[in-house]
Amino acid sequence: MKPDLLFLINLPEALLKSLSEQYNCHLYCDLDEQQFLAIAPAIRAVVSSAESTVSGDLIAQLPALEIISVMGVGYDGVDLEAARKQNVCVTNTPGLSTEDIADFTIGLLLCAARQIHTADQYVRNGEWVQGRYPMTGGVFGRRMGIVGLGRIGKAVALRAEAFGMSIAYTGRSKKPSESYTWHTDVKALAADVDFLVICASAGPETQGMINAQVLGALGPRGILVNIARGTIVDEPALISALQEGQILAAGLDVFSDEPHVPQALKDLPNVVLTPHMASTTEATVQAMFALTFENLATYFSGKPLVNQVNS
């Protein structure tokens, strides 16, 4: 019998058709309550994205669940404790989006520092005829601080070095193999850099880590870039810092309550807003799809999982 899969993400029709040869596929968004309750006892796998929420309540409603395959690096939306209690494996797709996210990070920084987004509007609105656009700050040779020097953090640092930047970082622990300057806490890091880039994983230990004190340490010429998770930043504190000039600007690809972005952020000219798209290039998404279903095929064939994130 083909395993039953529950999809918390939308898939291209062609991919669904292909998968239906191996699995019984159910799209969560297409199910009403009665339909869900009817198929829930048969579900053996859940396929989600890094932005999906796989709650303990959902896991408890799927008594036959064996594996959750996350299409993406982040799996903070999965209740890992509930998965552990029900002996459910959780897999992800690490490493595939690293370069795209690092590229996008530098793009956000350049846009925020050089005000490319507002300069574009300056031209479109016909304001150039009234005079030149005001001068902006520069990027080359400045100081970058990275919160979380993992795969993505290192890729960002490599690109920043090409811009002549000095690199400092903080994280769970110092990395002996790295020559970058180490700071024991994020506030000290913020005080020592011009650009603070968030590449850390989300979790209880990083919830609201970038708070008013950290933003104050970054200072009125500082720029914050977040391509990690919105929950890492105290969003109201960030809004206040941007409104009051406590920091210069921000580039944000992630938010606390996606896809809902506070109107106060939308109203600010000194913040660049993008819809959690840093990893979504065509090639990377195709590779993520492939690895997501390779993880499933590996599991159901009885082979050891390579990308399991829980034990």
Image (spheres, rainbow, N blue to C red):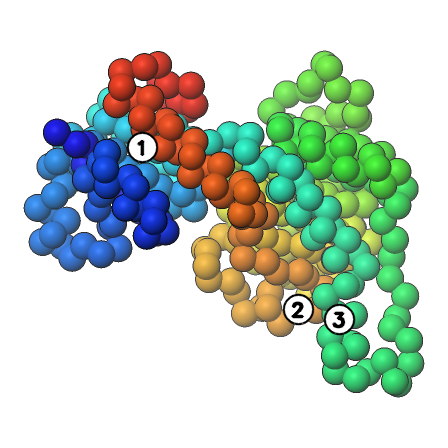
Asked if residue 232 can be seen in this view, the reply is no
Q: Considering the numbered disc 1 on the image, is that residue within a helix, a strand or a loop?
A: strand
Residue 213, position as x, y percentages in the image? 67, 46
Q: Nearer the viewer, mark 3 or mark 2?
A: 3
How far apart are labels 2 and 1 at the CA level? Answer: 39 Å
- Say few, some or many: other residues with alpha carbon within 10 Å of mark 3 (under 14 / 14 to 19 / 20 or more): few
Q: Is residue 301 above or below residue 238?
A: above
Q: Residue at x 62, y 42 (%)?
A: 101
Residue 171, position as x, y percentages in the image? 64, 28
Q: Which of 139 and 204 is in front in this view?
A: 139
Which amino acid does the dot numbered 1 rest on?
Answer: Ile
Residue assigned mark 3: 120
How far apart are labels 3 and 1 at the CA level? Answer: 43 Å
Q: In which quarter of the image is residue 40?
A: top left
How far apart are labels 3 and 2 at the CA level? Answer: 15 Å
Asked if residue 116 can be seen in this view, the reply is yes
Q: In this view, does 303 lie above or below 255?
A: above
Q: In which quarter of the image is residue 283?
A: top right
Which amino acid does the dot numbered 3 rest on?
Answer: Asp
- Say few, some or many: other residues with alpha carbon within 10 Å of mark 1 (under 14 / 14 to 19 / 20 or more): many
Answer with mark 2 or mark 1, whichever residue precedes in sequence. 1
